[in-house]
Image (cartoon, grey):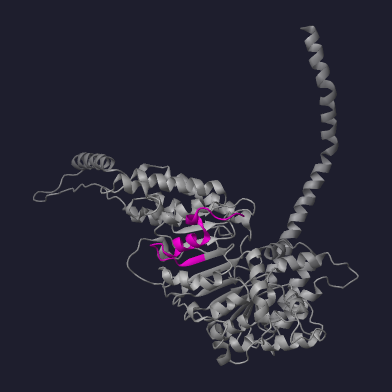
């Protein structure tokens, strides 16, 4: 707590009196020597220093970060005029970027604990309260509808209660439309994260007010958490298009945008027009687009039939000259480094026409697996694939195989295997992405019965000459599912998962592979707790195979997994079992005397109480 000037003067006066009295009584300077004692007020820490101290004290130290990514340091401090937007540290990696709804309760608990600590800091004194406002409103997670309503009221009330000197009554009425001329609390908002339960979504009117009062917004995230009406919108001000326009026309330079399209069927076509009109085209570094299931279903029925009937192009020239990409959909995002798509083939065609010179990381997560061999998918990777360093295909390989097999090609409804081979041969990710270094897949790859001795990490990327790291998601789910396999089916219940990882170590397919990373937190917990002997044997086998091929196995934190870690987990489990067994034996040894005492108390104590009551 910074001392006030009155307190510092009082302390300095006491120090001065003490020094002069003790100095005069205990020491007399020699003749001709003058001793001068200077006293002054103790210096106060400026608010900027206290703000940095508060930031270090309130950093998230939990395993689960409340948000998908942390704000870069240049966003967390006062703008000093230095632009380091080209630094590699600001690039979002999907190795540490979870999907939506992942560990929702744990992340929410971490957010509440940290916000409680920030609130306690703000209640120490008035000066700390003013400084802590920046921390309190910097990162906001709306997980209930009433929270958005309360925040909108707070921002509106602060806007009206502290107007500028030149504000008039008419300007106060339009505070929600033009709040930038007011000193509002919304200027502290850097990140707005909207993630609620499925049946408990927020009102778009409240979000529109919050966005209008946040002129310094840097990150906006919406994970299917905005309430939509089944009827026609009466208030166009809170429509999806107007809400998106409010974001792109905000005075802030928005860096990270996660947008969910709910009901606009032509969103993928007029998206370039809306972004180009705003100010975020030159500042956007991360973009995530998600289509709701109803919108994606209608788009697929209306548009994809035309795309799937065409054969994918086989050369880069034909990819760039696709007639399906309108010339008006071109857009330039010079700083976009990470792109996450939960879309379909038509939108891939639109993205293929965009100019993305800084693109490095791409994540594709979709329930519509038709893009796997469609023209949009091929056009996108044929245009931007050579720039990619990291790629994630977040879905099941088996679902892609089934979807491709049931789609007729060239009116041939019987030759399913020929259709599968022709379509998969046209998908050449290794050729389109020659500089790919990291690849992320799922652990649910199924057998390829045409080549049963080979299980690729993903059916669309069976090999790559320059791949150095492969991240695997959902290993915990695969272990739990295979753990319930009947014992007479396989000697090892994790036989198929073990073979899948063994194929990654074949130098013919991945000659430069150096790291295999388990991206599952639950899998790390199962490994550290030594949940079963089968799990222990599985990881010991994996570590032995990787040691033979000079490949490192890492957990979700990027820490190397060794035999020593497995043996340490086994030793800890044995020690815990021994402690539990000794505790049980002690309880059994005292079981008989304790039972006798309890029975004596139950029988004797009521009789003593009744006799005493009768004598009284």
Q: Nearer the viewer, residue 168 or 558?
A: 168
Asked whether the viewer can see residue 255, the reply is yes
Residue 505 relative to residue 586: left or right? left
Nearer to the camera, 616 or 290: 290
In the image, residue 298 lies at what x, y percent?
Answer: 65, 68
- Indicate whether residue 242 is drawn in magenta: yes
Asked whether residue 21 is drawn in magenta, I would say no
Q: Residue furthest right?
A: 488
Which residue is found at the position 52% from the left and 83% from the top? 387
Considering every residue shown, the one lying at the far left of the view is: 32
Is 39 positioned to the left or the right of 182 in the image?
A: left
Q: Is residue 1 visible?
A: no
Residue closest to the eye, 326 or 463: 326
On screen, 188 above or below 509?
Answer: above
Q: Is residue 226 left or right of residue 447?
A: left
Q: Give the quadrant of residue 278.
A: bottom left
Rendering coords of residue 434 (x, y %): 58, 88
Please tell me whether residue 298 is drawn above or below residue 162 in the rendered image.
below
- The picture quadrant where one finds residue 212 is bottom left
Q: Is residue 478 above or below residue 606?
A: below
**Residue bounds of the magenta highlight:** 230-257
Residue 483 percent coordinates (x, y): 81, 65
């Amino acid at each position: 707590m910074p001392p006030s000037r009155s307190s510092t003067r009082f302390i300095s006066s006491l120090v001065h009196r003490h020094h002069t009295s003790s100095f005069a009584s205990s020491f007399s300077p020699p003749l001709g020597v003058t001793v001068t004692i200077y006293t002054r007020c103790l210096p106060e820490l400026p608010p900027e220093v206290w703000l940095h101290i508060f930031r270090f004290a309130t950093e998230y130290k939990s395993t689960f970060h409340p948000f998908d990514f942390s704000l870069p340091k240049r966003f967390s401090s006062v703008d000093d005029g230095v632009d380091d937007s080209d630094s590699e540290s600001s690039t979002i990696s999907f190795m540490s970027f979870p999907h939506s709804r992942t560990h929702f309760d744990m992340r929410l608990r971490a957010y509440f604990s940290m916000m409680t600590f920030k609130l306690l800091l703000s209640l120490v004194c008035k000066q700390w309260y003013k400084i802590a406002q920046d921390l309190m409103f910097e990162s906001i997670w709306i997980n209930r509808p009433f929270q958005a309503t309360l925040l909108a009221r707070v921002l509106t009330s602060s806007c009206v209660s502290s107007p500028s000197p030149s504000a008039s009554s008419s300007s106060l009425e339009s505070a929600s439309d033009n709040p930038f001329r007011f000193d509002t609390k919304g200027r502290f908002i850097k990140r707005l994260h909207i993630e609620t339960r499925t049946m408990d979504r927020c009102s778009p009117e409240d979000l529109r007010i919050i966005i209008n009062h946040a002129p310094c917004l840097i990150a906006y995230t919406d994970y299917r958490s905005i309430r939509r009406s089944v009827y026609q919108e009466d208030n166009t001000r809170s429509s999806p298009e107007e809400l998106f326009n409010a974001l792109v026309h905000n005075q802030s330079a928005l860096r990270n945008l996660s947008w969910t399209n709910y009901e606009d069927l032509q969103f993928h076509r007029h998206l370039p027009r809306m972004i180009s009109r705003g100010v975020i085209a030159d500042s956007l570094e991360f973009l995530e687009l998600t289509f709701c299931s109803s919108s994606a279903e209608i788009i697929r029925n209306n548009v994809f039939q035309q795309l799937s009937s065409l054969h994918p192009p086989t050369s880069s020239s034909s990819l760039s000259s696709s007639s399906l990409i309108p010339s008006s959909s071109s857009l330039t995002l010079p700083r976009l480094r990470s792109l996450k798509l939960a879309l379909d083939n038509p939108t891939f065609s639109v993205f293929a026409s965009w100019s993305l010179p800084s693109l490095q990381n791409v994540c594709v997560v979709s329930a519509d697996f038709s893009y796997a061999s469609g023209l949009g998918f091929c056009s996108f990777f044929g245009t931007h694939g050579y720039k990619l360093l990291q790629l994630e295909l977040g879905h099941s390989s088996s679902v892609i195989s089934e979807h491709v097999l049931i789609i007729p090609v060239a009116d041939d409804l019987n030759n399913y295997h020929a259709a599968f081979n022709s379509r998969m041969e046209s998908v050449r990710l290794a050729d389109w992405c020659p500089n790919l270094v990291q690849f992320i897949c799922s652990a649910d790859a199924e057998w390829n019965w045409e080549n049963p001795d080979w299980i690729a990490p993903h059916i669309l990327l069976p090999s790559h000459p320059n791949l150095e790291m492969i991240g695997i998601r959902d290993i915990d789910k695969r272990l739990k599912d295979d753990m319930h396999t009947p014992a007479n089916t396989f000697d090892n219940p994790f036989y198929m998962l073990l073979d899948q990882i063994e194929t990654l170590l074949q130098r013919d397919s991945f000659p430069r592979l150096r790291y295999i990373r388990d991206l599952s937190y639950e899998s790390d917990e199962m490994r550290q707790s030594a949940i079963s002997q089968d799990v222990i044997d599985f990881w010991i086998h994996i570590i032995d195979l990787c040691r033979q091929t000079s490949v490192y196995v890492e957990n979700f934190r990027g820490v190397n997994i060794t035999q020593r870690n497995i043996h340490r987990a086994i030793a800890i489990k044995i020690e815990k079992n021994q402690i539990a067994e000794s505790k049980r034996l002690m309880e059994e040894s005292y079981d008989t005397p304790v039972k006798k005492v309890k029975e004596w108390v139950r029988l004797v104590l009521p009789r003593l109480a009744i006799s005493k009551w009768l004598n009284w």
